[in-house]
Amino acid sequence: MGAPNLLNPERRMLRAMQLSDADRSWDLASLLAACDWTDQAVAVGAGHGLQNHGYVSVSETRLREVRLDVEGERAVKDGLLEQRLWSWITEQSTATMADLQQAFERHEAGPGVGLLKQLGVEIESGVLVASDPERLEATLLERAAFLAALPAQAEALDETMLGHFSSRKNLIQSVERTVRHWSLTPAGLECSPDDLQESMVVTDITPELLQGEEWKSATFRAFDVALEATTPRTGRSHPMQALIERIRAIFLEMGFSELVDDYVQSAGWNMDALFIPQDHPAREMQDTFYLDEPASIDIDQAVMEAWKAIHEHGGETGSTGWGGSYSTDVSQRPLLRTHTTVNTIQYLAENPTEACRVFSVDRVFRKEAIDRTHLPEFHQIEGIIMEEGANLQMLVTTLKTFYAKMGYPEVRVRPAYFPYTEPSLEIEVKWRGKWLELGGAGIFRPEVTEPLGITSPVLAWGMGLERLAMLVLGLDDIRQLYISDLEWLRNQPIL
């Protein structure tokens, strides 16, 4: 009987099985040895192919093996925590809690005493006392013997001990594996050895193959195009990156240019240039990431003198400033930027008379506690328009156009306060019947623009990208955006 369309590994495996007892059941190790293979995947693949042809039958058994984990290996070497504490107690004439806490680290003393309490140890007037020492020691010996016996099949282990150690962290781990055995079928036994000689099998027709003569005597592998195939997994952009590209495309379509700059900035450009007082809470260590290196960042002295005048008495802007004393040392402190406006204001300072429309979508850093709505590192979307005649109506229209292109046609603004804009607005969009605040906007104050030689109005707005992403993707926890959950990522809509 012929053996058509068999691959070389399948022919070798079937020939090896025919040379032995017809009723023999082959395990993986014996197949590897008989076929002179070292790769288990080759044997399993060949067995699967022969099974599909009906030449072998396969039996599978799933086994659960229990092995030592990191803490379990340490326990076998040094003793279980409760055993070490009990050994110490038995060596003391009077074992007190105070002495135990001195003898053991804090992370061991507390949990260890808790384990001993489960074994009948009590604390009487600060002294550790066992109600039944013999039973306690017997249990400790059982636990040590259980760990020493590993690795072992789960079915052969004491269920009580297995449950106990499974509830403790990093002592044991359970590993499931599949054991396969292959046996010849009557059809496999009838295959002619002459048909099982290995030969060149062509799976791809290439120009190089056709240039030689080997293909004339080769076997061409047949493919059943009617068989169902799995859907191929193709690469795609992360939802955050896709959203960034969508926002970038909208800004470019609206005639803006993108601005990209450094994360490390000076407190002067990050705060002082935007008329944020030097005693503002946002400058405190608990809110801002300051750097030890470099020790300071140089800023043009004339610029700092202009900021000093603005902050102390308002300079020539007509403002009264913030009063107090301005420090140039504070201005030169290095930090991780808390907003992208620090880069925008430097761009405007370098081009104070050229009309511009610029935007940025980039990372910023604030010392936030991580929770469902806050991260210490996130993205900010910012846009700036500087041109003669720019006004509040232009700002509102631009915002409404941007959000309409994002898919949120209902937009409203309401009065707000920000240190460096006047008037200031908060932007809200309607989502699922509710108004949600998504960012702030306004016109730069004279205290910001005049010291830098900027004479035209500057319209500015910004928002957090992650908050917009949560809205677009329907999330209620910002951390989901940065968890490598492949199944969740595959199921996200294409933005």
Image (spheres, rainbow, N blue to C red):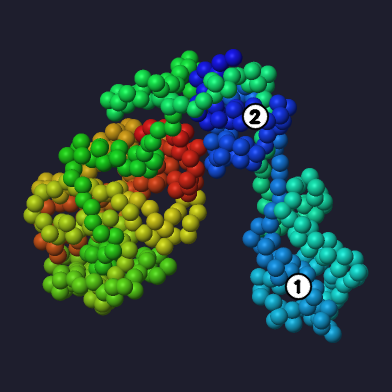
- Name the kind of residue labelled 1 in the image: Arg
Q: In the displayed structure, does residue 357 sit left or right of residue 134?
A: left
Look at 40% across and 25% down and name the residue there.
Answer: 202
Q: Is residue 273 visible?
A: yes
Q: Is residue 206 visible?
A: no
Q: Residue at x 31, y 57 (%)?
A: 339
* Amino acid identity at mark 2: Leu
Check disc 1 and report the residue beneath it. Answer: 84
List the residue tagged with mark 2.
19
Say which label, 1 or 2, has the lower sequence index.
2
Determine the image quadrant of residue 83. bottom right
Q: Nearer the viewer, mark 1 or mark 2?
A: 2
Q: Is residue 481 above or below residue 205?
A: below
Q: Label 1 crowding class (10 Å Cα cut-off): few <14, some 14-19, many 20+? A: some
Q: Secondary structure at mark 1?
A: helix
Judge by depth and name the residue closer to the eye, 187 or 407: 187
Q: Residue at x 70, y 68 (%)?
A: 77
Q: Is residue 205 above or below residue 333?
A: above
Seen from the viewer's position, the closer of residues 195 and 396 is: 195
Q: Is residue 301 left or right of residue 97?
A: left
Query: Is disc 2 surrounded by few (<14), some (14 to 19) or many (20+) residues within 10 Å?
Result: few
Q: CA distance from mark 1 to mark 2?
A: 58 Å
